[in-house]
Amino acid sequence: MTGKERYDNIEIPARLSEVIQQAQQRGRMEKRRRSVLRRSTITAACAAAIMITVNVPNVAMALSDVPVIGSIVKVLQIGSGGQRTDGVSVTTTAEENTLNINFSLNGEQTSSAPAYTVDYKAAPDRLIFSFYGVRNLDYMKLQEDIKGLSNVKDVYNNVILDDSAFRFVVELKENIDYSVSEYQQPGYIQLKLFGAKKPEQAHDVYYVRSQAMEQGESIAVLDEQYAADDSSVIKTKQGKFIVAMGGFKTREEAEQLLQKLSAREDYFEPMHIDHWMSNTSPE
């Protein structure tokens, strides 16, 4: 079950005050029923600030200095969320190492975030944000805000074959951890960056990759072709882009993947095995 499905399946008890009042009047009821009511009361009391944590090693850090406006829905490192919509406009604000991604529709701030996904890839460390149902976005402002964060090395967009979707990549500096929080009433996404508690030493990473290309439709088609193989678009040191799959520790694993891909009927664009350090970009 995806994060989005888990979120959609959360039941929020209605008539909170009545539930609490009834619970107080049933002090002599059997132990099992008191336990059930107590769990219901706790769930109801927390309904204003529902949180699902997914893969977050340091929730206390992620939730430090959270804003008082809006209710938190979830905190995650990878996953998805939001509500399906269309025609949403996106704006951003940034402060120190916190980025707020805000959403509006017909001039009014939305009550929830549009459907989105967040993914993480290594070599280099980067976050991939995809938003769906988005029609208007000030990318220059977004780029300026993200590059202003001291823990960010670079930011660039990915061309995708959907005119109502937008994807951008945040390349992190070395040994940076992060959290992504979703809020509602109003709806926005907050990215927080902070130093990793356990720094990782740089190491070789092996990928199956395409040739370097300019950003555009050709690389978007190739990325979509291999989406089921967990492909991603990476910016090279020269400023071009490649489609890459893998992120293996050994060359043998990359060779096995290349053999599998090259046996397909839709394999036309030549791929090859490459490797670079985990804290750098490909050539």
Image (cartoon, rainbow, N blue to C red):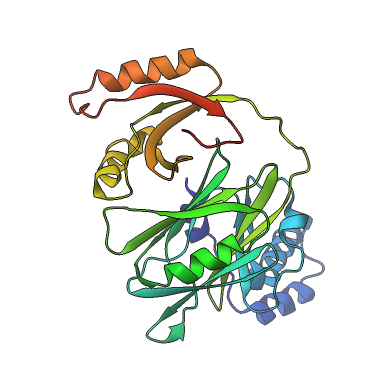
Residue 276 sits above or below residue 239 on the image: above
The residue positioned 72% from the left and 76% from the top of the image is 20
Q: Is residue 248 visible?
A: yes
Residue 105 left/right relative to 204: left
Residue drawn at 32 percent across, 40 percent down: 213
Residue depicted at x 56% and y 39%: 124
- Residue at image location 32% in from the left, 25% down from the top: 271
Q: Quadrant of residue 107?
A: bottom left
Which residue, as the protein is rendered here, is positioned at the far front? 238
| Residue closest to the far left | 265
What count of labels does the image hold? Answer: 0
Q: Is residue 219 left or right of residue 167?
A: left
Q: Position of residue 23 (x, y in %)?
A: 74, 72
Residue 87, by quadrant, is: bottom left
Rendering quarter of residue 199: top right
Looking at the image, residue 172 sits to the left or right of residue 209; the answer is: right
- Please say whether residue 182 is visible from this viewpoint: no
- Tell me residue 79's x, y (percent): 51, 49
Q: Residue furthest top?
A: 252
Vertical position of residue 239 compared to residue 280: above or below: below
Q: Position of residue 173 (x, y in %)?
A: 64, 47
Of residues 106 and 25, the one nearer the viewer is 106
- Of 106 and 55, the residue lying toward us: 106
**Observer-nearest of 219 and 236:** 236
Q: Tell which residue pokes out farthest to the right in this image.
A: 28
